[in-house]
Image (cartoon, rainbow, N blue to C red):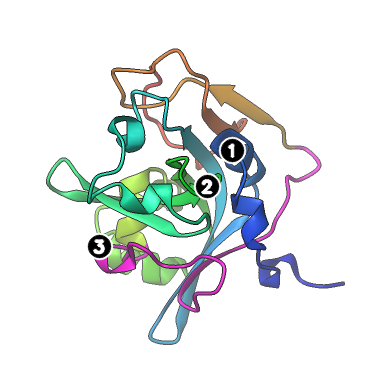
Amino acid sequence: MTDPLQIRFERSFFARPATRVARDLLGCYVHRRIKGKEMIGRIVETEAYHQDDPASHSYRGITPRTELMFGEAGYAYVYFTYGMHFCMNVVTGAIGTGEAVLFRALEPVSGTSEMFIRRIKAKTERDLLSGPAKICQAFDVGKPKHGEDFVYAKNLYLTQGSLRSNEKTLTTTRVGISVGIEKKWRFIIDGNPFVSKGRTS
């Protein structure tokens, strides 16, 4: 049997509506390789953002910041927020649609010692990747990774996974937004201890 940690996605997986991709990414894996060392996190929380969504960066159309969101699916959309944090998304949908999925929380799988080196404030594994900024800090993802191709890249990519037999998904409103608050576009693995503690809208 092929190890699911080694099966990458075709671009067609990402070229679908963000809400579908966000749900289907639960249980899948994010890989980050730095100087021969690999870190892996299992996706346990995502959020979807569409162009007609006032909470999305793409809501006001194409700008230098959001141009990538309107391009081909499967690329990393990395942005800087609050003057101190990076957050990582994957572009989804058809070319021209301006949508993406935010990685909100991961469950550490391997390479945790490397994660702790970068997440010096984390005291436990539960706190390592339980938020979008924490993921980028632990995985050393910043502006240079903006535009990375998750389909073919060697140092930052995604592989297939699935829910465990005792797991189910849950949808809620999203975290940390003041508009589009009614949309239940946050997807989590219900009861997973590594889901972020952010307050839903």
Residue 5 is inside the magenta segment: no
The magenta segment is 139-166
Ranked by sequence position, the earlier of labels 3 and 1 is 1
Left or right of 128 on screen, residue 101 = right
Give percent across and percent down for residue 48: 49, 35
Nearer the observer: mark 2 or 3; the answer is 2
Residue 49 locus on image (x, y percent): 44, 34
- The residue to which callout 2 is attached is 92
Q: Amino acid at mark 2?
A: Thr
Answer yes or no: is residue 188 visible: yes
Quarter of the figure that contains the N terminus: bottom right
Q: Which residue is mark 3?
A: 143
Looking at the picture, which amino acid does disc 3 mark? Lys
Residue 123 visible in the snapshot: no
From the image, tell me which residue sits under label 1: 17
Amino acid at circle 1: Pro
Q: Secondary structure at mark 2?
A: strand
- Vertical placement of residue 96 versus 9, above or below: above
